Amino acid sequence: MVLAALCYAAFYLLDRRRHKWPTAPHLWRHATLLGLMGTAVPMMAVTSSLKYQSAGVTAVLLTSGPAITVLMAHFFLADEALTVRKSTSVVLALGGALLLAVQGESGLPDVRQANPLGYVLVLLAMLCSSGMTIYARRFMRNLDPFDVSSIRIFAAALTVMPLSALLVGIDLQDVNPQGYLALGYATLVGTFSGMWLAFYNIKRFGATAAAMPLYVIPVISGFGGALLLREQITGGMIAGMGIIAAGIALINQQKRT
């Protein structure tokens, strides 16, 4: 996040014609809150959950996030009311996540029973992320996506960096070349570009559509974890993913009709 913040700062310094430094107080107020509750807290929670369960299980649990977003949008956004089809999709998606939780799947080859703390951390991340998606759609749709994303990253970085130094420490000696490549990818693609596109989706297409990319995560993380990290794709994970996929199909069908 610090590196991504520096990338945003570089744009303000080198391209002053198109990107002037934001000064509006309401912009800083809204975007800072989005950075704290919509970025810093979810990212720390998801990262911490990987100590207790595999990337695949975490990814499958995260796919219930859009269902939570749809449910919250019904109560807080007038233009995204909950229909019968959406309600069914919410029940299916949450049911898939609940199936994983009941079975206690960890997805790790050396851990049979998952630590419930992993599920709690993912739930916290989803609630914060969904809540701030609704907040952004309701109060920030007229703000510039680039300015919002830059302030969001600045606020998140300033929050996470001291906590990381205090609770975990900073030691770059153990980081190998692959780690630095992963860091560069996370900076440029996952954070710098990802945050801008995430807010643009919220502003342009709405809270429900902005939550849809989460459905790609379990496929990439599940199979990627199995290929690169020797994590297990269990029957419970496949069943949970299948139930969530049924909810996805209903939401997509709703959008087409």
Image (cartoon, rainbow, N blue to C red):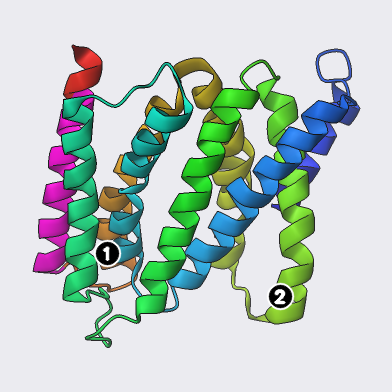
Q: Whole-Å distance between the Cαs marked 2 and 1? A: 26 Å
Bin the neighbour count of mark 2 within 10 Å (Cα to Cα): few under 14, some 14-19, many 20 and up: few
Q: Is residue 186 left or right of residue 7?
A: left
> Which one is nearer the viewer's eye here, 173 or 22?
22
Q: Is residue 180 above or below residue 76?
A: below
Residue 121 disc label: none
Q: Which residues are magenta?
A: 234-252
**Label 1 sits on residue:** 227
Instruction: Work out which residue is located at the far front of the displayed protein and give it.
Output: 75
Q: Considering the numbered disc 2 on the image, is that residue within a helix, a strand or a loop? A: helix
The residue located at (76%, 64%) in the rendering is 161
**Label 2 sits on residue:** 172
Q: Is residue 33 above or below residue 143?
A: below
Number of numbered discs:
2
> Which one is nearer the viewer's eye here, 174 or 109?
109
The residue located at (22%, 74%) in the rendering is 105
Q: Considering the numbered disc 1 on the image, is that residue within a helix, a strand or a loop? A: helix
Residue 171 falls in image quadrant = bottom right
Q: Position of residue 148 (x, y in %)?
A: 71, 30
Q: Position of residue 96 (x, y in %)?
A: 18, 55
Amino acid type of disc 1? Leu
Amino acid type of disc 2? Leu
Identify the mark nearer the N-term, 2 or 1: 2
> Which one is nearer the viewer's eye here, 33 or 77?
77
Q: Main secondary structure of the magenta part?
A: helix
Q: Is residue 141 left or right of residue 250?
A: right
Q: Is 207 covered by the magenta stretch?
A: no
**Quarter in which the C terminus is drawn:** top left
Q: Position of residue 199 (x, y in %)?
A: 57, 29
Q: Position of residue 135 (x, y in %)?
A: 58, 33
